[in-house]
Amino acid sequence: MRSIERTLKSEIAPVGTFTVKRALPAPGRKSIGPWVFLDHFGPFRIKPGEDGVGPHPHAGIETVTYLLSGRNRHRDSAGHEGIVAKHGAQWMTAGRGIVHAEAPLAENEDEMTMHGIQLWTSLPRAKKLMERKYQRIDAAAIPEVQMAGATIRIVAGDLSGVSGPARTEMPLFLYHVRLAPGGATELKVADGQEAGAYVIAGEPEVNGHASMAGDLVVLDNAPGDLRLAAGAGAEVMVLGGAPAEGPLVFHGPFVMNSVEQVRQAERAYVSGLMGHLEA
């Protein structure tokens, strides 16, 4: 097993009409593989017609919203639109720049509770200004693998010969792991790839290290795998992949490789080159 490099404690941050637990980026750690951002939102009961995140820009990244409960609608200025429910994902490639919005759209009582994870993955240097894309990933399209002590949903990447449905621009993986009470499981991590585990619920051990909900446990880069164990059960998001291609310049909703690229994205947004989206 790999050793633990550090544990990042999530912090509360406002987003749209609600608050989130933000675990990445953090002081001393900008990325895990190409993943550069992780927000954990909910669970909270929605106010129909009020909650959500209104139109705002992104550039240089892909945004991923994975739902643990609820129902979510995506719209963007490139004309893409899609709705996913529990265990589905919205996967948008912002590329050279796009404006998007997301909002809950409940159809029944169960979907009135919104809960999920939003992540950003930095695009490779050669694709920072690529064309915009969108993938609606329905829950039924995400394979679920039963392993010793755990159920694992493979959103992206490969695990035990099973591939997730997301078409990615960087070598990466994203797994939703649910540990049974007293369960333990080991996940293979390829040499040269970075890896981390965000604790959604419970108090699992990550490679023998005690953790709690809201922790993002970062593994070191030495060859070795990831082991999760939980006496009372737990829920974990495992993420990682090839290291992000830097330098990484963060500026609000833009993650670029230079200050000039950030300024270019700002000009494109203000001038309307990213398109428009009604609130």
Image: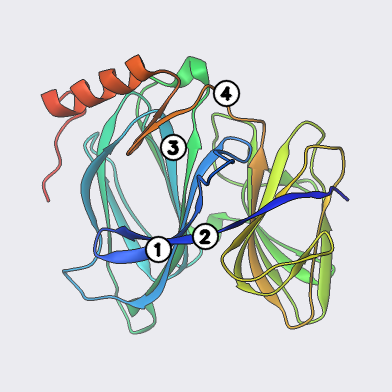
Q: Give percent across and percent down for residue 51.
A: 23, 67
- Work out whether 158 lies above or below 191: below
Give the residue at mark 4: 245
- Work out whether 208 lies above or below 217: below
Q: Give percent across and percent down for residue 184.
A: 83, 69
Residue 62 is marked as 3
Mark found first going from the N terminus, 1 or 2: 2
Distance CA(mark 4)–CA(mark 1): 27 Å
Question: Horizontal placement of 166 versus 94: left or right?
Answer: right
Q: What amino acid type should be assigned to the residue bearing mark 1? A: Val
* Residues marked 2 and 3 touching at CB (< 8 Å): no
Query: Dot 4: within a 10 Å radius of its alpha carbon, few (fewer than 14), some, or many (20 or more) residues?
Result: some
Q: What amino acid type should be assigned to the residue bearing mark 3? A: Glu
Give the residue at mark 1: 20
Q: Nearer the viewer, mark 2 or mark 4?
A: 2
Mark found first going from the N terminus, 3 or 1: 1
User: Judging from the image, what secondary structure is the residue with disc 3 in?
Assistant: strand
Give the residue at mark 2: 10
